[in-house]
Image (cartoon, rainbow, N blue to C red):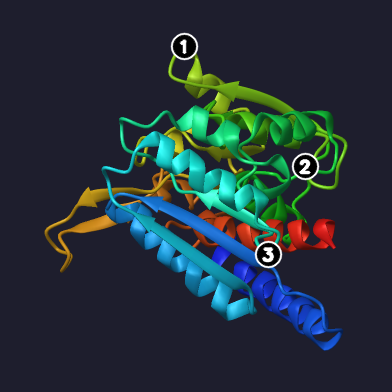
Amino acid sequence: MTILDGNKTSKDIKNEIAAQVERMKAKGEKVPHLAAVLVGTDGASMTYVNSKVKDCEMVGFKSTLIDLPEETSEEKLLQIVHDLNTDDDVDGFIVQLPLPKHIDEQKVLMAINPDKDVDGFHPTNVGKMTLGLPTFISATPFGIMELLERYEIETSGKHVVVMGRSHIVGRPMSILLSQKRKAGNATVTVVHSRTTNLKEITKQADIIVAAIGISEFLTADMVKDGVVVIDVGITRVPDDTKKRGYRLAGDVDFESVSKKASYITPVPGGVGPMTRAMLLKNTLLARERHS
Protein backbone atom coordinates (compact mmCIF):
# COMPACT_ATOMS: atom_id res chain seq x y z
CA MET A 1 0.00 0.00 0.00
CA THR A 2 1.31 3.40 -1.04
CA ILE A 3 0.27 6.64 0.64
CA LEU A 4 -0.70 9.39 -1.82
CA ASP A 5 1.16 12.13 0.02
CA GLY A 6 -0.61 15.44 -0.54
CA ASN A 7 1.79 17.29 1.75
CA LYS A 8 4.85 16.30 -0.27
CA THR A 9 3.18 16.71 -3.67
CA SER A 10 1.76 20.14 -2.80
CA LYS A 11 5.20 21.21 -1.59
CA ASP A 12 6.68 20.14 -4.95
CA ILE A 13 4.02 22.17 -6.78
CA LYS A 14 4.64 25.23 -4.61
CA ASN A 15 8.38 24.98 -5.29
CA GLU A 16 7.67 24.82 -9.03
CA ILE A 17 5.39 27.87 -8.80
CA ALA A 18 7.97 29.79 -6.71
CA ALA A 19 10.62 29.09 -9.36
CA GLN A 20 8.25 30.41 -12.05
CA VAL A 21 7.62 33.57 -10.01
CA GLU A 22 11.38 34.10 -9.66
CA ARG A 23 11.70 33.90 -13.45
CA MET A 24 8.91 36.49 -13.77
CA LYS A 25 10.70 38.81 -11.35
CA ALA A 26 13.98 38.37 -13.24
CA LYS A 27 12.24 39.53 -16.42
CA GLY A 28 10.70 42.51 -14.63
CA GLU A 29 7.20 41.09 -14.97
CA LYS A 30 4.37 41.63 -12.50
CA VAL A 31 4.02 38.79 -9.99
CA PRO A 32 0.62 37.07 -9.55
CA HIS A 33 -1.80 38.76 -7.15
CA LEU A 34 -4.48 36.73 -5.35
CA ALA A 35 -7.20 38.41 -3.30
CA ALA A 36 -9.52 36.70 -0.82
CA VAL A 37 -12.77 38.03 0.60
CA LEU A 38 -13.87 36.72 3.99
CA VAL A 39 -17.25 37.64 5.46
CA GLY A 40 -17.85 36.84 9.13
CA THR A 41 -15.93 34.81 11.68
CA ASP A 42 -16.46 31.17 10.68
CA GLY A 43 -13.50 29.38 12.31
CA ALA A 44 -12.76 26.94 9.49
CA SER A 45 -13.03 29.69 6.85
CA MET A 46 -10.70 31.99 8.79
CA THR A 47 -8.10 29.22 9.15
CA TYR A 48 -8.36 28.34 5.47
CA VAL A 49 -8.07 31.91 4.22
CA ASN A 50 -5.13 32.67 6.51
CA SER A 51 -3.35 29.58 5.20
CA LYS A 52 -3.91 30.82 1.65
CA VAL A 53 -2.25 34.13 2.55
CA LYS A 54 0.75 32.22 3.93
CA ASP A 55 0.88 30.10 0.77
CA CYS A 56 1.04 33.28 -1.33
CA GLU A 57 3.97 34.58 0.73
CA MET A 58 5.74 31.24 0.35
CA VAL A 59 5.66 31.27 -3.48
CA GLY A 60 6.21 35.02 -3.91
CA PHE A 61 2.66 36.05 -4.85
CA LYS A 62 1.15 39.33 -3.79
CA SER A 63 -1.94 38.72 -1.67
CA THR A 64 -4.79 40.82 -0.34
CA LEU A 65 -7.22 39.78 2.38
CA ILE A 66 -10.50 41.69 2.58
CA ASP A 67 -11.94 40.85 5.99
CA LEU A 68 -15.57 41.91 6.39
CA PRO A 69 -17.92 41.76 9.41
CA GLU A 70 -20.78 39.24 9.56
CA GLU A 71 -23.40 41.97 9.07
CA THR A 72 -21.95 43.14 5.73
CA SER A 73 -24.82 43.66 3.28
CA GLU A 74 -25.16 41.77 0.03
CA GLU A 75 -25.01 45.09 -1.82
CA LYS A 76 -21.70 45.98 -0.15
CA LEU A 77 -20.20 42.57 -0.98
CA LEU A 78 -21.31 42.82 -4.61
CA GLN A 79 -19.64 46.25 -4.81
CA ILE A 80 -16.37 44.74 -3.53
CA VAL A 81 -16.65 41.95 -6.11
CA HIS A 82 -17.16 44.59 -8.81
CA ASP A 83 -14.10 46.52 -7.59
CA LEU A 84 -11.95 43.37 -7.71
CA ASN A 85 -13.29 42.52 -11.18
CA THR A 86 -12.10 45.92 -12.46
CA ASP A 87 -8.80 46.10 -10.54
CA ASP A 88 -6.10 45.35 -13.11
CA ASP A 89 -3.56 44.57 -10.39
CA VAL A 90 -5.64 41.62 -9.09
CA ASP A 91 -5.20 38.51 -11.26
CA GLY A 92 -7.63 36.27 -9.41
CA PHE A 93 -9.79 36.30 -6.30
CA ILE A 94 -12.02 34.11 -4.21
CA VAL A 95 -15.04 34.82 -2.03
CA GLN A 96 -14.76 32.33 0.82
CA LEU A 97 -17.83 30.14 1.37
CA PRO A 98 -20.06 29.73 3.27
CA LEU A 99 -21.42 33.27 3.35
CA PRO A 100 -23.81 34.58 6.04
CA LYS A 101 -27.42 33.49 5.48
CA HIS A 102 -28.65 36.94 4.47
CA ILE A 103 -26.37 36.90 1.39
CA ASP A 104 -27.27 34.98 -1.78
CA GLU A 105 -24.15 32.89 -2.49
CA GLN A 106 -25.16 32.12 -6.07
CA LYS A 107 -25.73 35.80 -6.84
CA VAL A 108 -22.25 36.65 -5.52
CA LEU A 109 -20.52 33.81 -7.42
CA MET A 110 -22.31 34.80 -10.63
CA ALA A 111 -20.99 38.37 -10.21
CA ILE A 112 -17.34 37.26 -10.28
CA ASN A 113 -15.54 37.82 -13.59
CA PRO A 114 -14.93 34.28 -14.96
CA ASP A 115 -11.41 35.38 -16.00
CA LYS A 116 -10.61 36.01 -12.31
CA ASP A 117 -12.60 33.10 -10.89
CA VAL A 118 -9.64 31.05 -9.62
CA ASP A 119 -12.01 28.90 -7.53
CA GLY A 120 -13.52 27.67 -10.81
CA PHE A 121 -17.11 27.95 -9.55
CA HIS A 122 -18.57 30.33 -12.17
CA PRO A 123 -20.94 28.61 -14.65
CA THR A 124 -18.77 29.83 -17.54
CA ASN A 125 -15.76 27.97 -16.16
CA VAL A 126 -17.80 24.91 -15.20
CA GLY A 127 -19.17 24.84 -18.76
CA LYS A 128 -15.70 25.08 -20.28
CA MET A 129 -14.47 22.30 -17.98
CA THR A 130 -17.38 20.12 -19.10
CA LEU A 131 -16.47 20.71 -22.75
CA GLY A 132 -12.77 20.05 -22.12
CA LEU A 133 -11.79 23.63 -22.96
CA PRO A 134 -8.95 25.54 -21.21
CA THR A 135 -10.35 27.01 -18.00
CA PHE A 136 -10.01 27.20 -14.23
CA ILE A 137 -10.83 23.82 -12.70
CA SER A 138 -12.05 24.04 -9.10
CA ALA A 139 -9.13 23.44 -6.80
CA THR A 140 -10.12 20.16 -5.12
CA PRO A 141 -10.86 18.20 -8.34
CA PHE A 142 -7.80 19.85 -9.94
CA GLY A 143 -5.68 18.67 -7.00
CA ILE A 144 -7.00 15.11 -7.19
CA MET A 145 -6.25 14.94 -10.93
CA GLU A 146 -2.73 16.23 -10.28
CA LEU A 147 -2.19 13.62 -7.55
CA LEU A 148 -3.31 10.80 -9.88
CA GLU A 149 -1.03 12.07 -12.64
CA ARG A 150 2.06 12.55 -10.48
CA TYR A 151 1.75 9.10 -8.92
CA GLU A 152 1.17 7.69 -12.42
CA ILE A 153 -2.01 5.88 -11.42
CA GLU A 154 -3.60 4.22 -14.44
CA THR A 155 -7.13 5.47 -14.98
CA SER A 156 -7.71 4.57 -18.63
CA GLY A 157 -10.35 1.87 -18.92
CA LYS A 158 -10.70 1.63 -15.14
CA HIS A 159 -13.98 1.69 -13.26
CA VAL A 160 -14.10 4.77 -11.05
CA VAL A 161 -16.82 5.22 -8.45
CA VAL A 162 -17.37 8.81 -7.30
CA MET A 163 -19.23 8.97 -4.01
CA GLY A 164 -21.08 12.28 -3.92
CA ARG A 165 -22.57 14.61 -6.51
CA SER A 166 -21.71 18.10 -5.25
CA HIS A 167 -20.99 20.86 -7.76
CA ILE A 168 -17.62 21.47 -6.09
CA VAL A 169 -16.20 17.91 -6.04
CA GLY A 170 -18.37 14.96 -7.06
CA ARG A 171 -19.83 16.25 -10.32
CA PRO A 172 -16.62 17.78 -11.75
CA MET A 173 -14.61 14.66 -10.75
CA SER A 174 -17.01 12.42 -12.67
CA ILE A 175 -16.62 14.61 -15.78
CA LEU A 176 -12.83 15.02 -15.60
CA LEU A 177 -12.12 11.32 -15.09
CA SER A 178 -14.27 10.33 -18.07
CA GLN A 179 -12.65 12.85 -20.45
CA LYS A 180 -9.85 12.16 -22.92
CA ARG A 181 -6.93 13.35 -20.80
CA LYS A 182 -3.89 12.00 -18.99
CA ALA A 183 -5.73 11.02 -15.80
CA GLY A 184 -8.96 10.22 -17.62
CA ASN A 185 -10.59 7.78 -20.06
CA ALA A 186 -12.23 6.01 -17.13
CA THR A 187 -15.70 4.50 -16.88
CA VAL A 188 -17.35 6.50 -14.12
CA THR A 189 -20.25 5.68 -11.82
CA VAL A 190 -21.65 8.36 -9.50
CA VAL A 191 -23.29 7.14 -6.29
CA HIS A 192 -25.10 9.26 -3.70
CA SER A 193 -27.59 9.21 -0.83
CA ARG A 194 -30.36 7.72 -2.98
CA THR A 195 -28.24 4.89 -4.43
CA THR A 196 -29.77 1.60 -3.28
CA ASN A 197 -27.05 -0.97 -4.11
CA LEU A 198 -24.11 1.15 -2.98
CA LYS A 199 -21.91 -1.61 -1.56
CA GLU A 200 -22.38 -3.74 -4.65
CA ILE A 201 -21.15 -0.85 -6.83
CA THR A 202 -18.18 0.22 -4.66
CA LYS A 203 -16.89 -3.37 -4.54
CA GLN A 204 -16.54 -3.26 -8.34
CA ALA A 205 -14.47 -0.07 -8.31
CA ASP A 206 -10.81 0.10 -9.32
CA ILE A 207 -10.69 3.68 -8.01
CA ILE A 208 -12.97 5.34 -5.45
CA VAL A 209 -13.29 9.09 -4.87
CA ALA A 210 -15.08 9.44 -1.53
CA ALA A 211 -16.76 12.84 -1.21
CA ILE A 212 -19.99 11.91 0.52
CA GLY A 213 -19.55 14.01 3.67
CA ILE A 214 -20.03 11.24 6.25
CA SER A 215 -17.04 10.42 8.42
CA GLU A 216 -15.51 6.94 8.00
CA PHE A 217 -18.43 5.84 5.81
CA LEU A 218 -16.42 3.70 3.39
CA THR A 219 -15.30 0.52 5.14
CA ALA A 220 -13.16 -2.48 4.14
CA ASP A 221 -16.15 -4.69 3.32
CA MET A 222 -17.18 -2.16 0.64
CA VAL A 223 -13.97 -2.33 -1.44
CA LYS A 224 -11.98 -4.92 -3.36
CA ASP A 225 -8.30 -5.72 -2.95
CA GLY A 226 -5.96 -3.34 -4.80
CA VAL A 227 -8.42 -0.44 -4.93
CA VAL A 228 -7.13 3.15 -5.23
CA VAL A 229 -8.89 5.38 -2.69
CA ILE A 230 -9.08 9.19 -2.75
CA ASP A 231 -10.61 10.52 0.46
CA VAL A 232 -12.00 14.05 0.08
CA GLY A 233 -13.86 14.23 3.40
CA ILE A 234 -12.66 15.89 6.59
CA THR A 235 -14.72 15.90 9.78
CA ARG A 236 -13.94 16.64 13.42
CA VAL A 237 -14.77 13.48 15.39
CA PRO A 238 -14.96 13.78 19.22
CA ASP A 239 -11.98 12.02 20.82
CA ASP A 240 -11.23 12.37 24.53
CA THR A 241 -7.75 10.91 24.06
CA LYS A 242 -6.72 13.95 22.06
CA LYS A 243 -5.61 17.17 23.73
CA ARG A 244 -7.96 19.28 21.59
CA GLY A 245 -10.87 16.87 22.23
CA TYR A 246 -11.27 15.68 18.64
CA ARG A 247 -9.49 13.99 15.77
CA LEU A 248 -9.79 14.60 12.04
CA ALA A 249 -11.40 11.82 10.02
CA GLY A 250 -12.18 11.44 6.35
CA ASP A 251 -15.07 9.73 4.57
CA VAL A 252 -12.99 6.53 4.56
CA ASP A 253 -12.27 4.21 7.49
CA PHE A 254 -8.53 4.48 6.88
CA GLU A 255 -7.56 1.78 9.39
CA SER A 256 -9.49 -1.01 7.64
CA VAL A 257 -9.54 0.19 4.01
CA SER A 258 -5.79 0.89 3.86
CA LYS A 259 -5.15 -2.83 4.41
CA LYS A 260 -6.85 -3.61 1.08
CA ALA A 261 -5.87 -0.52 -0.94
CA SER A 262 -2.96 -0.25 -3.38
CA TYR A 263 -2.95 3.56 -3.00
CA ILE A 264 -4.80 5.73 -0.50
CA THR A 265 -4.84 9.38 0.60
CA PRO A 266 -4.56 10.09 4.34
CA VAL A 267 -6.68 12.59 6.29
CA PRO A 268 -5.21 15.03 7.01
CA GLY A 269 -2.33 15.36 4.56
CA GLY A 270 -3.95 14.05 1.39
CA VAL A 271 -6.42 16.05 -0.70
CA GLY A 272 -6.47 19.16 1.56
CA PRO A 273 -2.93 20.42 0.83
CA MET A 274 -3.48 19.74 -2.88
CA THR A 275 -6.56 22.00 -2.90
CA ARG A 276 -4.50 24.91 -1.56
CA ALA A 277 -1.67 24.28 -4.04
CA MET A 278 -4.01 24.22 -7.04
CA LEU A 279 -5.55 27.55 -6.06
CA LEU A 280 -2.04 28.97 -6.45
CA LYS A 281 -1.66 27.19 -9.78
CA ASN A 282 -4.94 28.70 -10.99
CA THR A 283 -3.76 32.16 -9.90
CA LEU A 284 -0.50 31.70 -11.83
CA LEU A 285 -2.57 30.63 -14.84
CA ALA A 286 -4.72 33.76 -14.47
CA ARG A 287 -1.61 35.95 -14.37
CA GLU A 288 -0.22 34.30 -17.52
CA ARG A 289 -3.55 34.82 -19.32
CA HIS A 290 -3.66 38.49 -18.37
CA SER A 291 -0.11 39.20 -19.60
170 or 247: nearer the viewer: 170
Q: Which residue is mark 3?
A: 89
As drawn, 90 above or below 121: below
Provide the secondary structure element on which disc 2 rests.
loop
Left or right: 16 with respect to 40? Answer: right
The local secondary structure at tag 1 comes to: loop
Above or below: residue 159 compared with residue 290: above
How far apart are labels 3 and 1 at the CA level?
51 Å
Residue at the far bottom in the pictured view: 26
Q: For the residues carrying marks 3 and 1, which lies nearer the camera in this image?
A: 3
Type of the residue with mark 1: Thr
Q: Earlier in the sequence, mark 3 or mark 2?
A: 3
- Residue 179 is situated, as x and y percent measured from the top left of the image, at 82, 33
Q: Position of residue 30 (x, y in %)?
A: 76, 74
Which label belongs to residue 155?
A: 2
Q: Nearer the viewer, residue 199 or 58?
A: 58
Q: Give, as a three-letter code, the residue at label 3.
A: Asp
Of the image marks 2 and 1, the number of the one nearer the N terminus: 2
Residue at the location (27% across, 50% down)? 236
Q: Which residue is mark 1?
A: 196
Instruction: Write down the quadrant of residue 91 in the picture.
Output: bottom right
Sequence-wise, which precedes: disc 3 or disc 1?
3
Residue 67, numbered circle = none
Residue type indicated by callout 2:
Thr
> Residue 222 at x, y = what percent?
48, 31
Q: Split into 4 quadrants, where in the image is the C terminus?
A: bottom right
- Decide which of 155, 276 is in the foreground and name it: 276
Asked whether, in this view, residue 23 is left or right of residue 211, the answer is right
Q: Are marks 3 and 1 in contact (CB under 8 Å)?
A: no
194 relative to 226 in the view: left or right: left
